Amino acid sequence: MSEETQSGRGVHDLAPGEEDLDGSGVAEGLRGYLVGLVLALGLTGASFYFARSSLIWAPGVATALIVLAIAQMGVHLVFFLHITTGPDNTNNVLALAFGVLIVFLILAGSLWIMANLNHNMPSMDQVMQMQR
Amino acid sequence: MSALDAGQGRDPHHLGHSRPGRGQGGGAVEEDRGGPAPNRVVVGYGFWLFLLSDIVMFSGFFAAYAVLVGSTAGGPSGRQIFDLNTAAIETVCLLGSSFTCGLATLAVGARMKLKFYGAMATTFLFGALFLGLELHEFAGLIARGYGPQRSAFLSGFFSLVGCHGLHVTAGLLWLLTMMAQVFAKGFRRDVLNRMLCFSLFWHALDIIWVALLTVVYLIGAAP
């Protein structure tokens, strides 16, 4: 009876698209969430430390914080949202890549065009400062 | 007829829709079931698309905030109003709630109702504490006259952080709904799918908070 699962049903009794869920893998799952929590807390702690201390050259602090934030987002994606390289995750990864592209276009495009507008058409108080 | 011919007969265009092990032959049952993707994968993919569109919407708020961050109109700047201690407690709350939400997912997988309720209740407490701290911060700012109408910077701040807070509020309501559904209906398949979507939603809120904490609070308060 090797094809009987814990729920008492045979493998072939499943409707298409269904799958058996049993209690296996709880310890593995717990380990994954614990690793994710420790990594996330560590990265957050590092962010707070670098924001408050003068360990990093002041103009570089923002870049360091953004790098740490992106690393932490990766930790969340892998350990909490379970985005993997497995075959059943290919669509998720592709959708994520497209989402990242759109987010990048919106952020970088907005900042770029607004900086350009500010440069070509300074606001009134900026003009006053230039004429001083 | 050889085994290879038989396989091609079942799946002439290599669509992978046949189920090895079902018809003649038997063989590999668990390695490659073929057939449609498991329910969990399809539901997760659909909800993942919604989450990505939500993140794209947030990127618009982030872009607005980043453009307006210098437009204080004589009002306070981020350095004067942000309290990093509150932000740190809020972050710990959200990270803890994400972890306990993961525990609730594991409890669902193992069909342990009591542990499920415990983990979900802890998640709710962490989330409610986060929301309380955020509302307290908002109320303090408005009481000092630094409401969203004070400057473009504060408008961007309130809409960005408030939008995340609204998402957390919706998540808390959803969380209570899931506890009630497990109580009333048990671990039914449709309840399991909703629980999967809820956990994805809650973890995605955490990702947005990481970006928010860095862009708004940490960089804003940095010297």
Image (cartoon, grey):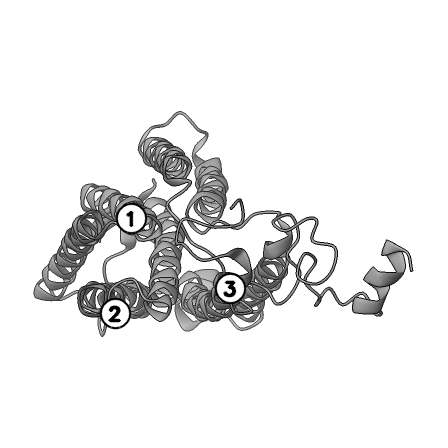
Along the viewing direction, whichever of B36 and B97 lies nearer the viewer: B36
Other residues around mark 1 within 10 Å, as few (<14) / some (14–19) / many (≥20): many
Q: Inspect this view and state whether residue A38 appears.
A: yes
The residue shown at (45%, 65%) is B55
- What chain letter is assigned to the residue under label 2? B
**Residue B15 pos. (x, y %):** 76, 68
B107 above or below A10?
A: above
The residue under label 3 is: A13
- What chain letter is assigned to the residue under label 1? B
As drawn, which residue projects farthest toward the right?
A: B1
Which three-letter amino acid code belongs to the residue tagged 3?
Answer: Asp
Along the viewing direction, whichever of B94 and A131 lies nearer the viewer: B94
Which three-letter amino acid code belongs to the residue tagged 1?
Answer: Ala
Give the numbered dot on residue B107: 1
Mark 2 or mark 3: which is in front? 3
**Residue A127 pos. (x, y %):** 46, 68
Tell me the element at label 1: helix
In the image, B17: left or right of B210?
right
Q: How many numbered markers are drawn? A: 3
Which three-letter amino acid code belongs to the residue tagged 2?
Answer: Ala
CA separation in Å, label 2 and label 3: 38 Å
Other residues around mark 3 within 10 Å, as few (<14) / some (14–19) / many (≥20): few
Q: Inspect this view and state whether residue B70 appears.
A: no
Give the numbered dot on residue B170: 2
Along the viewing direction, whichever of A46 and B84 lies nearer the viewer: A46
